[in-house]
Every structure is written in C-alpha cells, then in structure tokens.
Image (cartoon, helix red, strand yellow):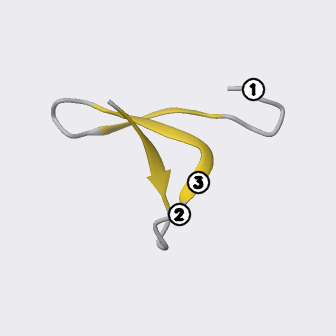
Amino acid sequence: MEVTVTDKDGKGIMGVKVTVEKEGKMIFAGIIDEGGKV
C-alpha cells in the first residue's frame, strides 16, 4: 500500500511516498524532485 506523507497541517508533501508493510512500518520509497528523478 502506497501513501503520501503529510506534514503537520495534513497537506501532502509532493514527491514523497512511503510503503506501508503489513506490520505497519513505513519504509522510505524515494523522493521525486522537480526533474522527475527518483
């Protein structure tokens, strides 16, 4: 399951995604910068 990381205000931080495992742990999936790189 992929979710978007949110800041204190609950807004999505663009380009930041995490993978949530069955254990509920959040694993860093990668940051996409303005150039579209991962």
Disc 3: which residue = 13
Disc 1: which residue = 37
Task: Tell me what residue is drawn at x 47 percent, y 50 percent.
Answer: 5
Most distant residue in the left direction: 23
- Check disc 2 and report its element: helix, strand or loop: loop
**Label 1 or label 2, whichever comes before in sequence order:** 2
Disc 2: which residue = 11
Residue type of the residue flagged with mark 3: Ile
Q: From the image, which quarter does the N terminus lie in?
A: top left
Most distant residue in the front direction: 11
- Image position of 32 with respect to 4: above or below: above
Task: Tell me what residue is drawn at x 47 percent, y 45 percent.
Answer: 4
**Marks 1 & 3, CB-CB < 8 Å contact:** no
- Check disc 1 and report its element: helix, strand or loop: loop
User: Which image quarter: residue 15?
Assistant: top right
Q: Residues within 10 Å of mark 2 (few under 14, many from 20)?
A: few
**Marks 1 & 2, CB-CB < 8 Å contact:** no
**Camera-side mark, 1 or 2:** 2
- Check disc 3 and report its element: helix, strand or loop: strand
Q: Decide if residue 12 is on the left or right side of residue 20.
A: right
Task: Tell me what residue is drawn at x 47 percent, y 72 percent.
Answer: 8
Q: Decide if residue 20 is on the left or right side of residue 9.
A: left
In whole angstroms, how far apart are the C-alphas of marks 1 and 2?
22 Å
**Marks 2 & 3, CB-CB < 8 Å contact:** yes
Q: Residues within 10 Å of mark 1 (few under 14, many from 20)?
A: few
Task: Tell me what residue is drawn at x 75 percent, y 38 percent.
Answer: 33
**Label 1 or label 3, whichever comes before in sequence order:** 3
